[in-house]
Image: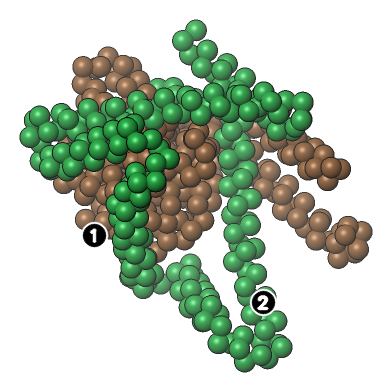
Amino acid sequence: MKKTIPILVAAAAALFILAALILGEPLAGWLEIVLNWAVIVASAALLVAIATLILTHLRNIVRGKRGFIFSIILISTFLVSFIGALVLGMDNSAYLRWVAAIQLPLETSLLGLSALVMTAAALQIFRSRGWSLLTLTFGISALVFLVISLGLLQALNIPVLTTFINFLQRLPMIGARGLLIGIGIGALLMGLRVVLGLERPWGE
Amino acid sequence: MNEMITLDLLALAIVSLALLSLAIALLTSRKHPYRNLRKNEALLDAEKLMHEAAEKGLRLTIGLGVNQVSSAPAPANLAGLPVLRLMSRRSVFNDQPAQALAGDGALAALGQLIVRGKYQNALATELFKPDFGLLAGATPYAYLAGLLPEVNYRANAGVFLIGSQRPETILAASLAEQKDLPLVAGTDDLSAQAVLLATNARLCLGEDALNAGAALESDPGAAASVRAQDWLRVLAVLGLLAGAVLKLLGVWQ
């Protein structure tokens, strides 16, 4: 019984959403209600996950675990932003500005770092994966598309060259579509497995 | 309006076809679900890695990914759970149990449910600690910030990044590479796949990341799903070719 109820709830919810998306108008109102329930349940799960995280870091502080200073920073920033949102409200412009002033520079610096690491990794691909058809294709295509993106070749205004560049620019799209079709089929079947109770993400 | 109805009917037909393929695959391979299944090279050594971690008294870390779309986990978010399931089962009595990190509340809760379940099955609930499955961060960058220190943990034997990962995950992959840790990665994000290809990660390409249960031979449903996917892919190829021919002949505008 304990195992059957979650399967039934998951299957019923998934079938209802599938029916509502296909039938459209007649179930639109109900669909909104069910999606709101999903948002509420997901938010409750987020609260539980945050509570676990906070308790874990509190334990780290109490036990003086290595790196507990980061736990202090995490808990204090969490409390300041949480209480700030409760007191001032989520839409308060001062609160939003304050959060953005901390979050944006941090995220931008991580993005910048990622860009540097990506460039370094691309340059080192032959060392990490060796010389193979895959790495050669990867390296050559990266170079070709870097050159095309500069726009210098297009500026020459040679009709044959422009046609060839247009053809080349379509190639990644074709490859991406192939991968996306595969991923789409995989995701569809995983969804069906959840609906049928074959895949139980919540099950141990 | 008519176009909308046609698209809806097409979607319904695809879902029905997928359901039929899955049912046939389940029925035809119920006795030997993993026989003649195409191998997932990236996950072939996963179990070996789990045994090695146990022998060395080290732990494995898994990043389950972030939620990029909505408030509920997307199918790709569930991709890492079969790996976590096996990893937790193998490490219940280890010196260093497996560590799961999620970039989404619901996913973190699911991860913790799985880990707790494994300890309950092994009648060792007293060994379970809630921090075996943690929320690394509720946004993609917060997830990355939470993931990096865990990859850097001194007692790591290997890192798995399976689920909905973003290109910035390369920071974690690069860190694992620097620490000489084996890394297995799989994601539904094409950009993330491309950047992870440039690292030394054992990479699950395309939809292979979604079928970890089949590769690890721990889920007959996932094995049937791989067979159904192969059939549907053949049908998609035939459909695309037929569409191209019909368009060339001017039958289909």
Q: What residue is shown at x 48% (from left), y 45% (from top)?
A: B68
Colour chosen for chain B = brown
Q: Position of residue A115 (x, y in %)?
A: 37, 66
**Looking at the image, is mark 1 or mark 2 nearer the viewer?**
2
**Disc 1 element:** helix
Residue labelled with disc 1: B178
Can see residue B158?
no
Q: Kindly identify the amino acid type of the residue bearing the numbered disc 1.
A: Gln
Locate the C terminus of chain B by quadrant.
bottom right
Q: What residue is shown at x 27% (from left), y 54% (from top)?
A: B176
The chain holding disc 1 is B
Q: Quadrant of residue A131?
A: bottom left
Real-space Cα separation, disc 1 to disc 2, in angstroms:
39 Å
Q: Is residue A47 left or right of residue A158?
A: left
Q: Foreground residue, A172 or B207?
A: A172
Q: Position of residue A27 (x, y in %)?
A: 72, 25
Q: What residue is shown at x 24% (from left), y 44% (from top)?
A: B150
Above or below: residue B80 compared with residue A46: below
Q: Kindly identify the amino acid type of the residue bearing the numbered disc 2.
A: Asn
Residue labelled with disc 2: A166
